[in-house]
Amino acid sequence: MVNAQTLTHLERLEAESIHILREVVAEADKPVMLYSVGKDSAVMLHLARKAFYPSPPPFPLLHVDTTWKFQEMYKLRDRMAAESGMELLVYRNQEAMDRGINPFDHGALHTDMWKTEGLKQALNLYGFDAAFGGARRDEEKSRAKERIFSFRTASHGWDPKNQRPELWNLYNARKAKGESIRVFPISNWTELDIWQYIHLNDVPIVPLYFAAKRPTVERDGMLLMVDDDRFPLAPGEVPVERSIRFRTLGCYPLTGAVESEAATLPQVIQEMLLTTTSERQGRAIDKDAGGAGMEKKKQEGYF
Amino acid sequence: MTDLVTDPIYKTDALIAEDIDAYLDVHQHKTMLRFITCGSVDDGKSTLIGRLLYDSKMIFEDQLEALQADSKRVGTQGQEIDFALLVDGLAAEREQGITIDVAYRFFTTEKRKFIVADTPGHEQYTRNMVTGASTADLAVILIDARKGVLVQTRRHSYLAHLIGIKNIVLAINKMDLVDYDQSVYDAILKDYTAFAHSIGITSFTPIPISGFKGDNITAHSEHTPWYTGPTLMAHLETVEVDQVSDQEKPLRMAVQWVNRPNLDFRGFSGQIAAGVVRVGDAVRVLPSGKTSTVSRIVTLDGDLEQAVAGQSVTLCFADEVDCSRGDVIAASDSPPQVADQFETTIVWMADEEMLPGRAYWLKIGTQTVSATVQQPKYQINVNTMEQLAAKTLDLNAIGVANLSTDRQIVFEPYAQNRTLGGFILIDKITNATVAAGMLHFSLRRAQNVHWQATDVSREHHALMKHQKPAVLWFTGLSGAGKSTIANLVEKRLARMNRHTFLLDGDNVRHGLNKDLGFTDADRVENIRRVGEVAKLMTDAGLIVITAFISPFRSEREMVRQMMQPGEFIEVHIDTPLADAEARDVKGLYKKARSGQLKNFTGIDSPYEAPLDPEIRIDTAGMTPDEAADAIVARLIP
């Protein structure tokens, strides 16, 4: 009688993520989606639109801005907020702004003040009690064990000894006043899943993921794109036009590009599959403080 | 480095380079399998997982470089790659004191995506394994061929079976260390078969492997010509998961969220737990029992004609039917049961032991209700499967106990439906998840005992006494003055022609509660009974005054919840411990200090002071008479 219909891996992942998004909306007082404009954020936003359709997702998008993102990221951010019918909140840490904190002169302090502190300030300012983030367990060793619902104290601390077991698809979202939850709806997706989903669902992503001729310079073995005139060039240095693309996107002075000719999604996926280095390899952030870099940042309140 | 890259196993799929579109097409139709590996490091569990990641080309060059360097530095396999290092980050984290219950790993082949739940260690094993197994379609039970079926093999198998995993793989590992001897394999298989049948596992798939050497992982091993079954990877790629059988069951969908963008649209969102739903199907909303017909299945990509178990959808009905979060949408001709008392199996996951009688939040599907667990019927020794007598359950203990909820819930036996039969218990004060459980069946009592409606209502009782019923709940340390002040309050109220009753801690323990001692569990039951009695008295219209130490916030909160809103007035008789001890009217502090008296509040048993009581009496600042006046003034302004 029944026409059995086997769900594909992407259909099962999608259904799980939608379930998580709805549980949070049903149980949290004031949820928000952290939107970084990268490909993972793009998929997370798309899943949210699916979860609540025909309503727009019943929470705002929060972009914790550092003023150092790629110009194309700002463009897509504004476009997606308009298309999804969601409120876009952009938060910039005023102190970092006043002190002119930037990735060229301040190194780790840049990430700490703009992103970690900025995020805490924004969450406090608006009083959000649940924040969706696009982190995945396959990204990095320390994330393999991260819960889908990650509890934070009133001061946004992450107490690794006090996280809750997650059984079946039952999520315990109860919390005391002042506490908050970070929720990762795409925990179980891999980089390949993300790309395949973008491909199948035509999810809009920043064009920087596709190869094009762009002005670049080399710094400490990383290929950086000169995205605006704030980039300090050595006397006489002229940026070199190279065909490049990005595997992950962050602040442009901290994000290494790869030389590539992959200009379409299948080509990007092909290159990703043929490549022999992991995705975060181009991110300076993981290398701070040795292998425990991400772990430390998380305890301090970084996503 | 180079010898590794040219290793014949480490090569990318030719299709990727030749025809990426064809490759993507294949991979778009992949299914997913979630599995758990059970065994300790000694069984070669990490090596096996590392091997699976490696053989399915999930290791990147930068990771491989690190792996090779680590293998030489700290590996246990000489100059060869130690695959265990790929996944053994956990050991170091444990040293840092970070609790890891489950780490998830991912790999993919062209047929399937795999999510592996990897649970570390020996301590906390039950909690971790149950957590990891709860989302698994399959369990790989690892046996060291040199050691055969061990106590831990039994434990792992029992837990996998308990959590309802139907696909069990018995991976008899380290075959290279027993010279690939078939008789060793056969003997282990015979042992395990006998054990498996004894605990109700009817079928499993045995595979002789070597995680370290790679035998029968992705390719049939030339060392085991006597083995004709599938390789481990082939089995993982083709084993049938429950999806199809789930779709053959009657429709079940727990409503997560009501979608109401405007007055013209009303949809019910949830993930289908069982069955298939089609436009035009007759459905029933539980617990109300109201029926309707599915008019639309709405998604962003357009309406669907049908949706199946596992999908997250939004359903619209042809009629206006009340339906909200917590309700279950079901096939109208085959609805699930509704009940409030159950037999359950509970896996305790918190450091603090279970307190029978204490109210916990119970979450099942999308329903959250208040629930109490009775004293366990028995506890199960997970190593021997023996049933042991138990008064409570400690961390990692598993027991069978009756449980009751404060209102009816929609459920199905766990064996039929994990979503409507699996639950978690949440501590009401700390909000921690303290247990996982499985509902087996509803108790007859729940079906046969009905609430008898009476004609003389509680309002009528109160009206006849010209008063508003209330409970003045005194709490405080022994010797704080609760009984003294309570007595003065009752005398004043009596003079004002108020109908009252004073329930005193010591007096109640001479009768109603004389079977109870002073353990935490008994204290909880003591308060529960007093709460129930006080509730009956407020129904009769009385002003009830209680004088009990009632040391735990949870139980005071439980009693508050029993009463009508506004009728519970918590009175904290606040005396510093030093003052109460100095007074020591009954000589109890002295006994407690000398160790003659155990579990004495304030000495070796905690007192949780109210955070926000309606009335707080600072005994250092007023006499008992002044205190009584203040309380009466608050009650009758």
Image: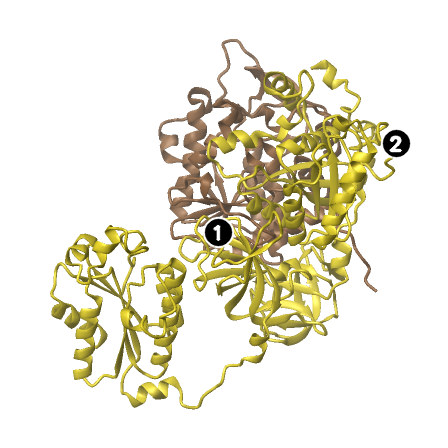
Chain colours: A brown, B yellow
In the image, taking residue B343 as reference, residue B308 lies left or right, namely right
Quadrant of the rendering where the N terminus of chain B is positioned: top right
- The residue where tag 1 is placed is B394
Q: Badge 2: how crowded within 10 Å, few (<14), some, or many (20+)? A: few
**Which of the two residues, B489 or B106, is positioned nearer the viewer here?**
B489
Taking the view exactly as shown, the residue that stands out farthest to the front is B596
Q: Is residue B94 above or below residue B363?
A: above
Residue situated in front as seen by the camera: B251 or B195: B195
Which residue is nearer to you in this view: A229 or B201? B201
Of label 1 and label 2, which has the lower sequence position? Answer: 2
Q: Which residue is mark 2?
A: B225
Secondary-structure class at tag 2: loop
Query: Residue A229, image x and y in percent?
Result: 50, 22
From the viewer's side, name the closer residue of B10 and B376: B376
Tag 1–tag 2 contact (CB < 8 Å): no
Residue A142 in sight: yes
Residue visible at 16% across and 71% down in the picture: B628
Q: Residue at x 18, y 69 (%)?
A: B484
Q: What percent of the width, then of the height, locates residue B423?
A: 57, 58
Give residue A74's quadrant in the image.
top right
Percent across and percent down for residue B141 are: 70, 41
Label 1, secondary structure: give it. Answer: loop
As drawn, B295 above or below A239: below
